[in-house]
Image (spheres, rainbow, N blue to C red):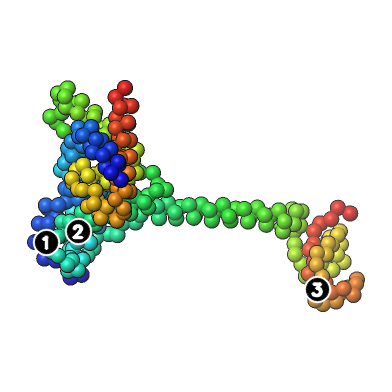
Amino acid sequence: MVGMDRDAFERIVTETKGWVFATAYHVLRDRAAAEDVMQETFLALYTRYDELDCKEAVYAWLKTVVYHKALNVARRNVFTELEDFVAEKIFSTPDCTSERAVYADQMMERLQEGLGKLSSEHRAILLMREVEGLSYEEIAKRMRCSLGTVMSRLFYARQNIRKFLERRSK
Amino acid sequence: MSDLKEKLAAQERDFAPVADMLKRKFEIDAAHAPEVDIAAIVAGTLPKRVPRWRGKLFVRLAFAAVLLLLTVAILVSIYWLPSHTEAVHRLAFDDAERLLNANRLKEVTILYQSGRAEIQTDTPLPMVWVRKGEN
């Protein structure tokens, strides 16, 4: 294994591991699987760094790789049941004592639940648009699908999340 | 397409509060990211993840194999094994004859015939299935 300079690798890992993990986790909704995807993504970066044409585009490359790896795992897991969500562990911050914080946490849990009703592809597109702020064209390029597919999936994903939240609020 | 774009733009405005929550959730998840095993990656010893479907597939295959074996065992016991549990010995014809002469057996059932010609008949009788008869 030739790989890249260890210091540079560590720096990239430190800077990017948060969103690499969060991206995988949003697509998969499974902490253990997301952690595996994160490790594999960084392994791919370390082993294939020399093959990258443009070293400056390493962050964009990482984003594409983590999405594809997570979606591949999600497709493979079609016949398996994903583990239960561990929201209470993630959101159990000590300052969440006020009513507002509790309400926000409830909303967040509902959102998490709603995201669970979507397919991994829909979650990925929603994440790219709402969190990363990518354009439809950029999403289509990253997902390797048509512009129409991106738009219809995004429309469907938002509509379903919203319907779910409205139902749960009643 | 333009119609869908307009719908999406309108939807985006309504969806803004949810999008904010989604961003916050993403940040919380990112802050809780586990450690990357840099040492294992650099050393090339990062254990390869075994997809869970493969494990489950193995269990399913094993289960199917056990079921198949059980089915075969049941079919064999029904169609091939002799139904009489009293059958006690499989003897060469000479041994059977000796036992008959010694009055130790009451009945000899011949199951199949081939090979050498022997006593009582010209038909070749290499082996017999001997059991204690009711006669």
Amino acid at dot 1: Glu
Question: Element type at marker 2?
Answer: helix
Residues behind callouts 1 and 2 on a single chain = yes
**Residue B106, percent across and down?**
86, 59
**Residue A158, percent across and down?**
29, 37
Q: Residue at x 62, y 53 (%)?
A: B71
* Observer-nearest of B77 and A41: A41
Quadrant where the image shows the N terminus of chain A: bottom left
Residue topped by disc 2? A61
Disc assigned to residue A56: 1
> What is the C-alpha distance between the residues marked 1 and 2?
9 Å
- In this view, the residue farthest toward the front is B2
Residue topped by disc 3? B114
Q: Point out the tag, 1 or 2, that comes first from the N-terminus.
A: 1
Q: Which residue is drawn at 40% across and 52% down?
A: B53
Q: Residues within 10 Å of mark 1 (few under 14, many from 20)?
A: few
Disc assigned to residue B39: none
Whether residue A149 is visible: yes
Amino acid at dot 3: Ser
Position of A140 relative to A92 (above/below): below
Chain where mark 2 sits: A
Amino acid at dot 2: Trp
Whether residue B34 is visible: no
Q: Residue at x 26, y 42 (%)?
A: B5
Would residue A136 appear left or right of B116 to someone viewing this image? left
